[in-house]
């Protein structure tokens, strides 16, 4: 049986669950885009390639695989920052690039959209992907495609596939069933010894705590993780990047741990633990509140994708999925002992009474939105105070929160809203974004209007780059003020409203809940120095006045923990 390079690649993408591809047309990629659309995969045009990458990233976090389709050179280079973010945060993303014809690549003539050397873009992508391949031979193309997709799925990181124009319709073998290679099993002796050591520590601990991280989501381990959590009866916190690896309505969920920027009740439980079991958690600066965490003086157990580290004992070839399942199986009936703790879901019971005429503040807005979101919403949070504000919102379901808590690229959230809306159309996106970040990718609001998305965009207008103001004030933090609430009218869809008081916000939210035809943009007017407490503390730690060189604590500190993750 015969296929073409394009149909082979597209069939493989459909087999692994792709239904949408984001991108921008360009002359080198037009023929392939035709084949993509003919296949039934919906092409979603975005305003630029960077935004396509952000949208596909969020789509992949929910759907399990995402895709962008762009032209060679200018298109591929424009998307690179989004692809770098997906690489940093382990997001399986397929980057499809339509390239020059094979004969053109061998010509001495310079090609438009390029930088002179036709291999430069592929070489650049090799640093932010697990596979960067050129399909310049139809016979070998199926092998290259299968190998690259297998790596994307196994490593949960981006790949880049370049398809020359004259290769799109070249004949090749037809695809059969796609079966990515199975992950190598854990070394049984190392796994058994590691589980014995972990259980010995947990069984004798007085205050053990579980810390869940993003790898539990990326590797599809959340159901097994929940089984372990419930068998253990222990409190479970998550990192900011791993928020909602377990529903925050779960009675054992205590919320997000971010070092000293966390709520005091979480700090008390996590930082007074004698054994901290970190499953799939990355030891990064933002995850642990930069330099504010107090985790020295306790046993640290770090289980990540390919190794397990207990204090200074390192077990190689130990798969995190086997660790989670093995611990669940070894839990004693009734679980492990721990002092009483309170679930984060209690934050839903605090109530909120609107005070007409009262000026809006970050704290009051967060409290009101905490009661607004629910099972039918997905929260997307922008880099900056938006992500810290959203950290303590109680999410009602798994994967209910999307935010770049490691790479922290400003401008991510608005295009990500488009991707989240398409990946899970049954849940309404609720997006937090600052005015500075909004200006970076504002044009993607027009894509939401075009598709009549029911997204609710909560734009926190505090007059500039407030995160940077908190770190260090300067004229570079000022931006041109916009009438943001008028942009839905400019872009031709949805509606917008500017609110300055609590009763105005209440009216806008009621109207948003009642409408479902196009995006809602609520411009929330705030004082430029009104921020979350977490951002204030983080800003103080990052301030240049604190000095350029900081020495992390030793003996169980973040510096020691990171040695086990390299």
Image (tube, grey):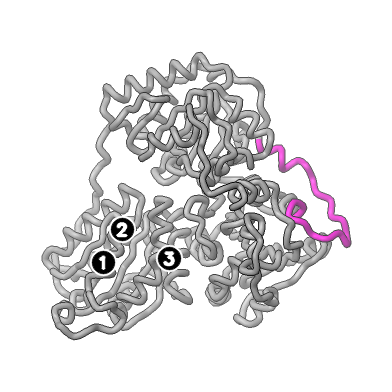
For the residue carrying disc 3, how many other residues have a C-alpha within 10 Å: few (<14), some (14-19), or many (20+)? many
Segment colored magenta: 344-365
Q: Residue 247 in the image: state x and y as whole percent.
A: 57, 41
Question: Is 439 one of the magenta-colored residues?
Answer: no
The reply to whether the C-beta atoms of the residues labelled 1 and 2 are less than 8 Å apart is no
Residue at 62%, 78% (x, y): give it. Answer: 493
Query: In the picture, residue 488 is in which quadrant?
Result: bottom right
SS under mark 2: loop
- Quick check: marks 2 and 3 in contact, CB under 8 Å? no
Which is closer to the viewer, label 2 or label 3? 2
The residues tagged by marks 1 and 3 sit, at their Cα atoms, a distance apart of 17 Å
Where 199 sits versus 40, above or below?
A: above
For the residue pair 340 and 80, the one nearer the viewer reads as 80
User: Disc 2 to disc 3, how far (Cα)?
Assistant: 16 Å
Question: Between residues 283 and 379, which one lies in front from this camera angle?
Answer: 283
Name the residue carrying label 1. Answer: 122
Residue 35 seen by the camera:
yes
**x, y (%) of residue 194?**
35, 23
Residue 345 among those drawn in magenta? yes
Q: Quadrant of the C terminus?
A: top left
Rendered image quadrant of residue 137: bottom left
Give the mark, 2 or 3, whose residue is nearer the N terminus. 3
Q: Residues within 10 Å of mark 1 (few under 14, many from 20)?
A: many
The residue where tag 2 is placed is: 127
Q: Say whether residue 474 is left or right of residue 222.
A: right
Q: Where residue 53 is drawn, which disc sits there? A: 3
| The N terminus sits in image quarter | bottom left
Element type at mark 3: helix
**Residue 442 relative to residue 24: left or right:** right
């Amino acid at each position: 049986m015969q296929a073409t390079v394009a149909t082979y690649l597209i069939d493989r993408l459909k087999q692994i669950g792709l239904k949408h591809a984001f991108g921008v047309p360009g002359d080198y990629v037009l023929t392939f885009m035709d084949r993509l659309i003919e296949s039934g995969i919906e092409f979603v045009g975005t305003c630029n390639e960077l935004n396509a990458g952000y949208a596909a990233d969020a789509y992949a976090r929910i759907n399990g695989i995402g895709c962008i389709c762009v032209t060679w050179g200018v298109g591929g280079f424009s998307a690179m920052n989004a692809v770098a973010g997906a690489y940093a945060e382990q997001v399986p993303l397929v980057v499809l690039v339509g390239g020059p014809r094979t004969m053109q690549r061998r010509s001495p003539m310079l090609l438009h959209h390029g930088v002179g050397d036709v291999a430069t873009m592929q070489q650049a992508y090799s640093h932010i992907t697990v596979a960067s391949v050129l399909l310049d031979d139809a016979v070998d193309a199926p092998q290259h495609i299968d190998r690259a997709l297998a790596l994307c799925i196994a490593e949960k990181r981006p790949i880049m596939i370049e398809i020359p124009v004259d290769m799109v319709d070249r004949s090749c073998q037809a695809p059969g069933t796609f079966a990515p290679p199975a992950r190598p099993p854990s070394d049984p002796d190392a796994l058994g010894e590691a589980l014995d050591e972990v259980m010995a520590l947990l069984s004798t601990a007085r205050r053990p705590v579980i810390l869940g991280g993003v790898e539990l989501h990326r590797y599809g381990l959340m159901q097994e993780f929940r089984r372990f959590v419930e068998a253990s009866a222990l409190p479970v916190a998550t990192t900011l990047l791993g928020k909602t690896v377990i529903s925050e309505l779960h009675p054992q969920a205590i919320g997000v741990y971010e070092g000293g920027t966390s709520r005091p009740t979480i700090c008390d439980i996590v930082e007074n633990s004698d054994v901290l079991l970190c499953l799939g958690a990355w030891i990064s600066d933002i995850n642990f509140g930069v330099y504010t965490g107090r985790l020295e003086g306790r046993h640290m157990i770090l289980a990540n994708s390919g190794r397990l580290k207990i204090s200074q004992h390192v077990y190689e070839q130990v798969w995190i999925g086997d660790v989670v399942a093995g611990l669940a199986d070894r839990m004693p009936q009734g679980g492990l002992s721990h002092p009483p703790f309170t679930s984060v879901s209690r934050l839903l019971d605090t109530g909120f009474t609107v005070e007409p005429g009262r000026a809006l503040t970050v704290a009051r807005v967060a409290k009101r939105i905490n009661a607004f979101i629910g099972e039918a919403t997905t929260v997307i949070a922008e880099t900056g105070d938006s992500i810290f504000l959203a950290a303590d919102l109680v999410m009602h379901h798994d994967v209910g929160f999307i935010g770049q808590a490691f790479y922290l690229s400003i401008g991510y959230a608005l295009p990500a809203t488009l991707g989240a809306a398409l990946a899970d159309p049954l849940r309404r996106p609720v997006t937090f974004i600052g005015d500075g970040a909004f200006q970076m990718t504002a044009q993607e609001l027009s894509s939401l209007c075009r598709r009549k998305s029911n997204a609710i965009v909560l734009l926190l207008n505090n007059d500039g780059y407030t995160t940077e103001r908190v770190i260090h004030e300067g004229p570079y933090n000022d931006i041109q003020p916009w009438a943001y609430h008028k942009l839905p009218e400019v872009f031709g869809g949805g509606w917008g409203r500017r609110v300055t008081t609590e009763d105005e916000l209440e009216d806008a939210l009621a109207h948003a809940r009642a409408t479902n035809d196009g995006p809602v943009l609520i411009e929330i007017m705030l004082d430029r120095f009104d921020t979350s407490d977490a951002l204030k503390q983080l800003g103080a730690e990052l301030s240049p006045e604190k000095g350029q060189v900081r020495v992390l604590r030793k003996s169980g500190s973040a510096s020691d923990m990171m040695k086990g993750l390299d």
